Amino acid sequence: MTLLKKLLLLILIPLMAFGLHKYYISLTQIDYKAQEKSLQISMRLFTDDVEKTLTSNFKKDFKLDTPDELANTNKLLEFYINSHFKVHVNGKLLAIKFLGKEYDQDLVYFYIEIKDVASIKSIEIENTILMDEFEEQQNIIKLNIDKILKTMILVRDNDKDLLNF
């Protein structure tokens, strides 16, 4: 084997191994707006992961960000999010309002609001989004509550966390 072939193999094999592994991560930002008494939430997920999960859950062919996107996609997304994302403030489960979504290349952003949050002494987040489809899913939650910054990393075996203030 020539030196060039050996060198190519040494470079390509490790690159191929890294290319085969896909990461399953979502990022959720939660900001408490005391003046408005609301939690403003944005979620960032990979569009193809959301499509696969929704297709499995609703037995329909989801093609997000295409002319073939289903007319009732937002309604189904709202149902899915409400089933897999729970927020308890001061021990009380709060209602989530899905505001909408937008696409940015291979990402989809969900926008959510929770109203009537007068103060936060404790907050518990449960996030099982995409965990029903991807065993390795990690949902990272970044919180900004009264200028206190906290991060949670939720996985299938530990899908909720509680913070006290």
Image: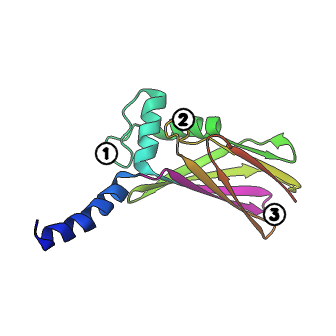
**Which residue has dot 2 on it?**
132
Q: Secondary structure at mark 2?
A: loop
What type is the residue that disc 2 sits on?
Asp
First in sequence: mark 3 vs mark 1: 3
Label 1: few (<14), some (14–19) or many (≥20) C-alpha neighbours in 10 Å: few
Picture disc at residue 67: 1
**Which residues are drawn in magenta?**
22-42
Place of residue 119 in the rendered image (x, y in percent of width and height, measured from the top left): 87, 57
Place of residue 57 in the rendered image (x, y in percent of width and height, measured from the top left): 49, 30
Q: With 35 as the anchor, is 121 left or right in this view?
A: right
Looking at the image, residue 63 lies above or below residue 120: above
What type is the residue that disc 1 sits on?
Pro
Looking at the image, residue 155 lies above or below residue 11: above
The furthest residue to the top: 59
The furthest residue to the front: 1
What type is the residue that disc 3 sits on?
Ala
Q: Is residue 92 magenta?
A: no
Label 3: few (<14), some (14–19) or many (≥20) C-alpha neighbours in 10 Å: some
Q: Secondary structure at mark 3?
A: loop
- Display colour scheme: rainbow
Looking at the image, residue 123 lies above or below residue 129: below
